Image (tube, helix red, strand yellow):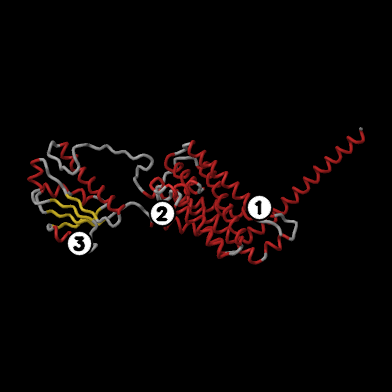
Amino acid sequence: MGGDGGDILETVLDGGQACGARRRASLRRIRALVVKESRQLVRDKSNVLVGMFLPLLLILIFGYGLSFDVRNMPVAVVLEDTSPTATDAVAGLYLSPYFSPLTLTNMANAEQLMRDGEVDGIVRLGPDFSRRLAAGDASIQIIVNGVDANQARVMQAYAQGAVAQWNVRRRAAGEPLVSMVGSVTLQERIWFNEANSSTWFLVPGLIVLIMTLIGALLTALVMAREWERGTLEALFVTPVRAGEVLISKIIPYFGVGLVGLALCLLAARLLFEVPIRGSLLVILFCSMLYLLVSLGVGLLISAAVKNQFLAAQMAVLVSFLPALMLSGFIFDMRSVPFAVRAVSSVLPATYYVEALQTLFLAGNVWPLILKDCAVLAFAAAALLALAKARTRKE
C-alpha cells in the first residue's frame, strides 16, 4: 500500500511538472509571436497609418465637420411695418448667431428668394403690426423651407425663441404681447449638456467608431493577408497552437487601440472641451471590453473569408456601418421601426455608445454602466471563442 501510494504521488508530481513545462513552453511561444507581430506592425506603414493617424483624422473630420447645430441660417425679415416697435420685435434675430437676416419690405421678393434657395426662411411682420399689437392681437408669421425637415424645425424653434425673449421683456414692462408665443412663461433648463452643443453628444460616439475601425478592420486585414500569403500555414506546422496565434494577434493591436483611445480622450477634452464627468478608469475598462469585441469580430471575419478584399468589405458591413447607423451614435433608436430597434439591441456598439455618453455627460450612473459592461464582456467572450473555434490547424 505504501509503495502504491508513493507511485501515485510520484505520478501526480510528474504530471504537475509536465503541465508546468507545457505552460512555460506556451508562454515562450506566445512571447516570441507577440514580438514578431509587434515588429511586423511597426514595419508595415499602412498599419501604423490606420492605427495612429486615422483616429486623429476621423476625430478632426467628425468633430469639426459633423454637427447637428444650425448656425448662420439665411432668413428674410419682411418689415411691411417699419415702425420702431416692429423693428424691436425682430431685433433678436439680428443678434442671434443662428441667423443671417436680410431685411426686406416686400413679401413677393422674399418668396422669390425662398424659391431660388437664397434664404431658408421668412419672418414677416404685416403692415398693421403696431396697430394690432396695441389692440392685443398682433402676430408674426414664420415661414420655413421644409425640404430639410430637421433644419426647418430648428429654424422655427430658434425664431420663436427670439420673439419669445422680446415678449418676456414686454410682459415685464406690462405691454401687449405677440399672440404667436402665447401668455405662458417657459423656464428652461438643460441637463447633462448645458452648452446645448451636438459636439458633446457626437464625440463619445466617435470614439466607438475609431475603436471599431482599429479593432475589426485592421485585424481582419492583417489576418486575411497572412492567410493569403501562407504565413499562418507555415506557423501551424510548428508546435504553435491556434489559440496562441490569436493571442499574439490580439496583444499588439490591443495596444494600438489603447493609443487611439488616448488620442480620442485628449482631443475630446482639449479640442472640443467635452466634459468627462465619470471615472476615467471606468471609461478605460469599458473601452478595453469593446476593443476585445472589435478584435474578436476582425479575427472571426478573417478566419471565415481568408481574403483581404472580402475581409475589408465584411468588416465595414458587419462592424463599422452598424456602429455608425444603428448604435444611437447619430440617430435616436426610439424613433425607428421595431425591426431596426431589435437589430440595434444586439449590437455591442449600442451598449458602448450608451456607456460612453453616460460617463462623459452624466457621470457614474452604475445601473447603466454595469449593464453595458456585462453585455460587452459577454460579447467579447463569445466572439473570441468563436474566432478560436474557427481558426483550426489543418
Q: Quick one: label 1, few (<14), some, or many (20+) residues within 10 Å?
A: few
Q: Earlier in the sequence, mark 2 or mark 3?
A: 2
Q: Residue furthest bottom?
A: 229
Of residues 232 and 46, the one nearer the viewer is: 232
Disc 2 secondary structure class: helix
Disc 2/disc 1 C-alpha distance (Å): 39 Å
The residue labelled by disc 3 is: 113
Q: Earlier in the sequence, mark 3 or mark 1?
A: 3
Q: Quick one: label 3, few (<14), some, or many (20+) residues within 10 Å?
A: some
Where in the figure is residue 130, as x and y percent of width and height? 9, 46
The residue labelled by disc 2 is: 63
Say if 249 sits above or below 351 in the image: below
Q: Residue at x 16, y 57 (%)?
A: 103
Q: Earlier in the sequence, mark 2 or mark 1?
A: 2
Where in the figure is residue 141, as x and y percent of width and height? 17, 50
Disc 3/disc 1 C-alpha distance (Å): 64 Å
- Left or right position of 356 against 128: right
* Residue type at numbered disc 3: Leu
* Residue type at numbered disc 1: Ala
Res 248 → quadrant: bottom right
Of badges 3 and 1, the one in the foreground is 1
Q: Residue at x 22, y 37 (%)?
A: 185
* Residue type at numbered disc 2: Gly
Disc 1 secondary structure class: helix
The mark found on residue 389 in the picture is 1
Of badges 2 and 1, the one in the foreground is 1
Disc 2/disc 3 C-alpha distance (Å): 32 Å
Q: Is residue 198 visible?
A: yes
Q: Quick one: label 2, few (<14), some, or many (20+) residues within 10 Å?
A: many
